[in-house]
Image (cartoon, grey):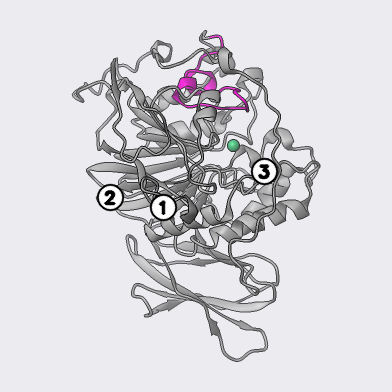
Amino acid sequence: MERRCYTAVNKGLKYTILTGLTLAAGFAVAQNKKFRDPRSYPFTESANPGAVVVPQPSTSGFGEHARGSNDPLFVAQELVGRPTDTSVTIDAKAVKALEVYYEYGTRSGAYTGKTTPKVFSPNEPFNVQIDNLKPNTEYFYRMRYRDLDDKTFNTRAEHSFHTARTPGSTFTYVLQFDPHMVEGNNEEAYKLTLKKMLADKPDFMIDLGDNFFVDREKPATEKHVVERVELLRSYYDLINHSVPLFLALGNHEGEWGRNLDGTNQSVAVLDTIARKRYFPNPVPNKFYSGSSKEEAMVGVRQANYAWQWGDALFVVLDPYWNRPVPPEMEGDWFTTLGHEQYEWLRKTLEGSHATYKFIFSHNLIGGLDMKGLMRGGIETVKYLEMGGHNLDGTWGFDKARPGWELPIHQLLVRTNATIYFHGHDHLYAKQDLDGIVYQEGPMPSRVGKTDVSRSAKDYNYTHGTVLGGSGYIRVRVSPADVKVDYVQTYLPREEDATHKDGMIADSYTIKARKFNPAAYE
Ligand SMILES: [Fe+2]
């Protein structure tokens, strides 16, 4: 194994820079070689979890937060979702009944198409799908609306989006992790982060969860859940009129199968319904795959889905809704994709010849309990559904997940995954394991000089590039390589000679490769 130091630019609040690399050199490995035994992965980076397990009750509350945007008529403004090669869906909500249509075209100010005018009910989010678009094309659009007794339509501001890229394209997407908007989060910092993301002109944004953060009110009420969803929506409104949004679930959205109680008032049901009303996430169709299961009280959940964009496959996972089904084991193994989602993941990865494969889940499928559940990065990949070992280091996958082919990490190695993005731990950590980058992301919504050295220690981040601060991750995908930047946010009062809003605190490039040599013996 090779050990080396990263030379990150603008180090900021660097915690440790030592990294362990297990990426084998050379790519000329015969395709017909047998896949290695999943138990044979050395996981040499794994640390003994027992030393850092400290239970800690949560002490923070919600705090008071102003809305991110304020429009007295449109309390939820234009938000683009479900972009495909030929369509997008735009969601909005007004406080009174309106007749609405969208006009659109490929040149700013020149609209060649329009949707059929429709009447929408007051205080009810409404989706409009724009169809028959050209692939790989930038579009401009604006909303036209009028009161039901008016003769003329009013005009809202022009926005834009891009339909799905074709292979060979270069494009950018952005990621945010754990906006929270609870105690300790800062509205101005969050707005600064969103502003920079919008200025990047990304094709889309993926939010890795812990956004609505509704699970602290016990018992949950519909009023509280909707208030939280609307508060967060007022911040998404600052960017997602022109940047299609994909939402991944966090543990704090409450959409856990174990929270279901048979009524329509559990936090799991309330959040799912509110999320779906305000955010058009993908549903399975010709462009997206995912779960099409009609769940009781909530329908198709739009929580795990995959799509191809340019040369890349994108896969969003949901580790909360499904529970182990006997003889699958619970206990330490309670976090699971569930067999159905796992099989979908396996087939999606195995069936894709995309040059790059990006995986997104709020936390690793397992992780360790270190001052909070499911913590950690590559140091924890060895364990549970992620790597197949029990917490005592013995092999447990065959007993805990009978009939499942491989633990998730080994499946990702075998199918040439590029980066696994995860949040939950509120810091920046770029780590390498068996040719895959595990990338933990920073919060977008706190002051820039936040020090994470304590939480990095508590969550056992002992390898890779670990940085504090606030901001987002920007990914530029091209046929030759993938470039990842950590863009930091600093409030004006925090800026000095070495801390500038928008500075790139870390950056790395991954070259295109045909397959991952670490998948073979
Ligand atoms: Fe979380």
Label 2: which residue? Answer: 167
10 Å crowding of disc 3: few (<14), some (14-19), many (20+): few
- Would you say residue 150 is visible in this rendering? yes
Rendered location of residue 38, percent (x, y): 42, 15
Which amino acid does the dot numbered 3 rest on? Glu
Q: Is residue 134 left or right of residue 445?
A: left
Disc 3 to disc 1, how far (Cα)? 44 Å
Write the residue at 56% across / 19% down.
401
Of residues 281 and 35, the one drawn nearer to the viewer in this rendering:
281
Q: Does the residue at mark 3 contact the one at mark 2 (Cβ under 8 Å)?
A: no
Rendered location of residue 124, percent (x, y): 68, 66
- Would you say residue 405 is visible in this rendering? no
| Most common secondary structure along the magenta stretch | loop
Disc 3 to disc 2, how far (Cα)? 35 Å
10 Å crowding of disc 1: few (<14), some (14-19), many (20+): many
Residue 307 in magenta stretch: no
Label 1: which residue? Answer: 501
Eye-nearest disc, 3 or 2: 2
Of residues 257 and 292, the one drawn nearer to the viewer in this rendering:
257
Q: Secondary structure at mark 3?
A: loop
Look at the image and give the residue range highlighted in magenta. Answer: 367-392
Q: Earlier in the sequence, mark 3 or mark 2?
A: 2
Quadrant (top left/top right/bottom left/bottom right) for the C terminus: top left
Rendered location of residue 381, percent (x, y): 47, 22
Label 3: which residue? Answer: 295
Q: Secondary structure at mark 1?
A: loop
Write the residue at 60% across / 58% down.
233
Residue 368 in magenta stretch: yes
Tell me if the residue at label 2 has its CB under 8 Å from ligand 1. no
